[in-house]
Image (cartoon, rainbow, N blue to C red):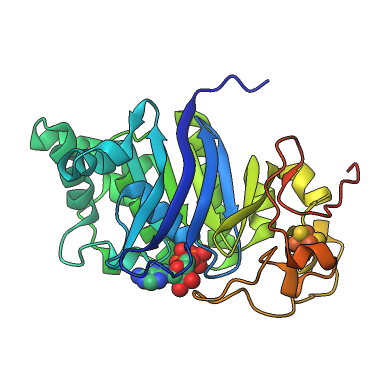
Amino acid sequence: MNTRRIALAVCGLTVGHARKARARALVDDLSFEVAEGEMLAFVGESGSGKSLTAAAIFGLLPFGLRRLAGSVHLRDTELTALSERALRVRRGRDMGLVFQNPLTALNPSRSVQAQIAETYQVHKGGTRGAAWARARSLLAEVGLASAANGPETYPHQLSGGMRQRVMIAIALACDPILLIADEPTTALDVVVQAQILDLLTRLRQERGLAVLFITHDLALAAARADRVLVLYAGRAVEEGDAARFFRAPCHPYSRALRDAIPAIHGLGGRLTEIPGLPPGPGALPPGCRFAPRCPSAQDDCHQTEPTMRRTAPRCACLHPSLETP
Ligand SMILES: Nc1ncnc2c1ncn2[C@@H]1O[C@H](COP(=O)(O)OP(=O)(O)O)[C@@H](O)[C@H]1O
Ligand code: SF4
Ligand SMILES: [Mg+2]
């Protein structure tokens, strides 16, 4: 039984257009939890609402979009009830964000040691010397020994993988409860990708960090996460233990994603594409939103919208595959 404390609990999160009442929700009634020390992978095609979910948790939705419903608990604090000022403090201290392109987040004219020290000092106070010592120890922790022990280092002197390590060090500066990694390795080659994911795995084990790992790559999710949550057009369609999920996905969309992986378990295989496109922002089909692309669709699928099963395996499908793995 999992007795770990829940770090993040999202309930009924709905994100949509602030001024277009008839436009469909872009994140639709989404609920999930991440425990301390756990990695939950968010998987789905581009445009399924993964990054908007992260932005809503951080209270940083783009202009024109807003949270229409739902709650976001970080440990015992309801984040959606906080003032902007209080939320800003929480963001820097208790939640870290790492995303695909670290260059846009790093200041090119300041050393990485200074940028980490500053993040620490803004939130934790203390002397400049203590903040620099903390920066160097974090750089060592994320595997950047030369920057930890050597002279000041600037972002342009580092490779993509090393910059991503710096971003992780900044995110960890104040001992956060939650780390959200949004496609953190998409721009990296496979060797560096594996190293960064090894680092995230070690950090969550050693620090008890809750990690929300956002990816469009189901193979990575299955290999790295404890649990997987699949999103389709803003809705959760399946959630479960990663190993079970990969062996026997029960939603047709999850099966299609799994079958699109070219080499399952290293045995080789054929890359199959999922025919069709997800629904656009304005047009949802009646009934199940996956029905136009679903190889298992039946007549009722075009009328009735499926809801998430309450018992395992949890999926939202009128005709799920419930075979034992
Ligand atoms: N600033 C925005 N204004 C309007 N629609 C947006 C905005 N940002 C994202 N969207 C739409 O919201 C949906 C989900 O986007 P996103 O969360 O970025 O997808 P993902 O991260 O899964 O690729 C997409 O259909 C996208 O077009
Ligand atoms: S409800 Fe029907 S259309 Fe939707 S995923 Fe299940 S079988 Fe396919
Ligand atoms: Mg995204």
Evaluate whether residue 186 shows in this view: no
Residue, x 64% and y 39% (percent of image)? Answer: 226
In the image shown, does 296 or 115 lie closer to the viewer?
A: 296
Q: Is residue 130 above or below residue 98?
A: above
Can you say which quadrant of the picture contains the C terminus? top right
x and y percentages locating residue 146 in the rendered image? 33, 51
x and y percentages locating residue 229 in the rendered image? 62, 49
Q: Residue furthest right?
A: 323
Residue, x 53% and y 43% (percent of image)? Answer: 31
Q: Residue furthest bottom?
A: 276
Q: Name the image quarter holding residue 138.
A: top left
Q: Is residue 86 above or below residue 59?
A: above
x and y percentages locating residue 309 in the rendered image? 72, 42
Q: Is residue 305 left or right of residue 180?
A: right
Q: Residue furthest left?
A: 127
Q: Is residue 178 above or below residue 277?
A: above
Residue, x 58% and y 56% (percent of image)? Answer: 235
In the image shown, does 215 or 191 lie closer to the viewer?
A: 215
Q: Is residue 140 left or right of residue 319?
A: left
In the image shown, does 28 or 35 lie closer to the viewer?
A: 28
Q: Is residue 311 left or right of residue 46?
A: right
Q: Name the image quarter holding residue 139.
A: top left
In the image shown, does 41 or 172 lie closer to the viewer?
A: 41
Residue, x 32% and y 38% (percent of image)? Answer: 79
Can you say which quadrant of the picture contains the N terminus? top right
